[in-house]
């Protein structure tokens, strides 16, 4: 039914209707409304079905995007979901939080002026429809295998691996130090980007599939890595990276200067109905305050937009480079600007002012210099350009580094890279410890959810091959 496609010349690009900024500032709901079936089919029909689909090439998961766009245009939504889910464990989550403007949509070959297909919005629509109509069921194996796998970390990498291994018939146990599954998808990403029931229903689905979750269980404290290795045929480390990068300088220890993840976690826990004393007493609450966020990534965008919704008097984002060099999604920047956030470009903090509590940030103007070895322009301070911004709350969103896992897990033989991430054999995803694998941010550094999903699925393949090769009574390869 090719006549349904290549409509980009006659049908303009259109996202789902976006709620007005004034309304968005007052609640935590997702900012885009739902596509109707007709609108989703119309937008999917804009796909040019090109011979070399650059959208698929630039998707970390290699999603079969042209195929499920065509099926959506033809109204074959259940088939579209099956195609999307064949390569992506969480298409409803990627459709919401992937930076499509840098990945699939940013590489769409439709000529500029006609604009790319709204891939992410269609992906979200397909999977939300699948949930509503009951097409998504717990992953059940054809038969049970006499092997078990322990997974450390209930974030996207760990849960993606768990689903793949459960489908093959393994007994899967996930160990996580927090009280809910989902990792940063639960505690790091605000509701207006990813509503928590979207994540929690996957947790419930996996519990129904027989995956066992050991929550509030810190490996290295409540159970040792050595115990897990003895208990399971293989172990996957998918802890993510949670160590916040810090910033020094005069006044850096003043009260009112907080890490981004502490701030976001407090907000998300409050939204989930938890008791959060540091939120209630104002330490991690932006209400009525002048807020400055330092950083330019997606975490910084989450912070500034959260502060707006908490009722901050003003919100400014201090970033040492310009808009073109910002690592965060440009869509997120536009959303933030619409909601009243002020961006202070080419500016870096040099000191924090105040007595016991922060009262402002003294910053210096920056100049973009020559590119370094990576091709990125260096930044240099402009002499005599210092200025001060008033602030009652300063949030440091400077990125994350890996924790010292060999020390935490009492496993000094775990090899690390020079960046502190776990060193693995990328062909097998195995660490320096036999039978211990790793995936996600703890391997590649702080990155995207979509890359964590990819790594988790790849690790599941490596674990399956390892267990089948080393089992005392190898079984036939389970259905892939």
Image: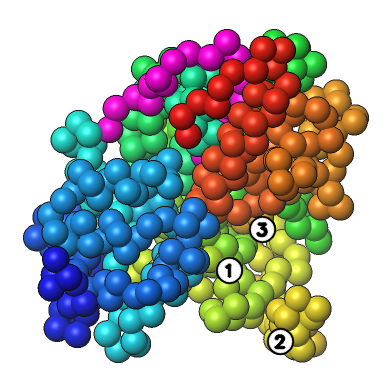
Of circles 1 and 2, the one toward us is: 1
The one nearer the camera, 353 or 220, is: 220
Answer whether residue 352 is visible to the viewer in this image.
Answer: yes
Q: Is residue 175 left or right of residue 43?
A: right
Callout 2: 10 Å neighbours few (<14), some, many (20+)? some
The one nearer the camera, 86 or 277, is: 86
Question: Regarding mark 1 in the picture, which secondary structure is present there?
Answer: loop
Numbered badge on residue 350: none
Answer whether residue 27 is visible to the viewer in this image.
Answer: no
* In the rendered image, the vertical position of residue 28 relative to residue 351, given as above or below: above
The residue that mark 2 highlights is 367
Which quadrant does the N terminus fall into? bottom left
Question: Regarding mark 3 in the picture, which secondary structure is present there?
Answer: loop
On whether residue 152 falls in the magenta region, the answer is yes
Question: Regarding mark 2 in the picture, which secondary structure is present there?
Answer: strand
Of circles 3 and 1, the one toward us is: 1
Tag 3 or tag 2, which sits nearer the N-term?
2
The residue that mark 1 highlights is 327
The residue that mark 3 highlights is 398
Residue farthest right in this picture: 412
- Tell me the distance, in whole angstroms, between the alpha carbons under discs 3 and 1: 11 Å
Callout 1: 10 Å neighbours few (<14), some, many (20+)? few
Q: Is residue 455 left or right of residue 111?
A: right
In this picture, which residue range is highlighted in magenta? 136-159
Q: Is residue 262 left or right of residue 66?
A: right
Tags 1 and 2 touching, CB below 8 Å: no
Return the x and y of residue 309 as percentages of the image width and height. 37, 52
- Tell me the distance, in whole angstroms, between the alpha carbons under discs 2 and 3: 19 Å
- Tell me the distance, in whole angstroms, between the alpha carbons under discs 1 and 2: 17 Å
Residue shown at the point (30%, 72%) measured from the top left = 49
Return the x and y of residue 347 as percentages of the image width and height. 65, 77
């Amino acid at each position: 039914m090719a006549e349904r496609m290549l409509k980009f010349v006659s049908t303009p690009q259109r996202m789902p209707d976006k709620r007005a900024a004034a309304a968005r500032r007052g609640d935590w709901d997702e900012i885009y409304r739902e596509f109707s079936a007709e609108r989703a089919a119309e937008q999917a029909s804009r796909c040019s079905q090109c011979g070399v689909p650059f959208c698929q090439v630039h998707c970390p998961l290699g999603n079969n995007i042209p195929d499920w766009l065509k099926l959506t245009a033809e109204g074959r939504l259940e088939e579209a979901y099956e195609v999307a889910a064949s390569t992506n464990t969480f298409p409803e989550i990627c459709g919401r939080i992937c930076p499509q403007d840098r990945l699939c949509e940013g590489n769409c070959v439709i000529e500029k002026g006609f604009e790319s297909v709204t891939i992410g919005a269609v992906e979200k629509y397909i999977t939300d429809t699948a949930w509503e109509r009951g097409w998504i069921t717990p992953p059940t194996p054809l038969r049970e295998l006499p092997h078990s796998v322990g997974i450390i970390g209930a974030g996207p990498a760990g849960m993606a691996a768990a689903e793949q291994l459960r489908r093959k018939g393994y007994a899967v146990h996930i160990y996580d130090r927090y009280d809910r599954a989902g990792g940063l998808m639960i505690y790091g990403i605000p509701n207006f980007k990813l509503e928590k029931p979207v994540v929690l229903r996957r947790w419930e689905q996996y519990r129904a599939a027989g995956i066992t979750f050991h929550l509030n269980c810190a490996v290295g404290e409540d159970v040792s890595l050595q115990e897990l290795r003895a208990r399971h045929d293989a172990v996957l480390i998918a802890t993510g990276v949670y160590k916040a990068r810090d910033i020094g300088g005069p006044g850096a220890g003043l009260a009112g200067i907080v890490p981004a993840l502490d701030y976001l976690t407090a907000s998300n826990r409050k939204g989930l109905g938890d008791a959060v004393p540091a939120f209630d007493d104002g330490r991690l609450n932006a209400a009525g305050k002048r807020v400055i966020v330092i950083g330019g990534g997606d975490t910084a965008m989450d912070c500034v937009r959260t502060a707006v919704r908490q009722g901050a008097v003003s919100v400014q984002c201090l970033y040492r480079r310009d808009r073109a060099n910002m690592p965060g999604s440009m869509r997120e920047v536009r959303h933030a600007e619409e909601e009243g956030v002020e961006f202070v470009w080419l500016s870096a903090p040099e000191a924090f002012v105040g007595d016991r509590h922060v009262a402002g940030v003294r910053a210096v103007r920056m100049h973009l210099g020559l590119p370094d070895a990576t091709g990125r322009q260096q930044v240099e301070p402009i002499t005599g350009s210092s200025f001060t911004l008033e602030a009652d709350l300063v949030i440091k969103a400077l990125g994350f580094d890996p924790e010292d896992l060999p020390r935490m897990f009492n496993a000094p033989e775990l090899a690390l890279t020079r960046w502190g991430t776990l060193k693995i054999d990328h062909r097998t995803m195995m660490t320096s410890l036999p039978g211990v694998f790793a995936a996600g941010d703890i391997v590649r550094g702080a990155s995207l959810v979509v890359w964590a999903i990819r790594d988790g699925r790849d690790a599941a393949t490596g674990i399956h091959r390892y267990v089948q090769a080393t089992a005392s009574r190898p079984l036939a390869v389970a259905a892939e």
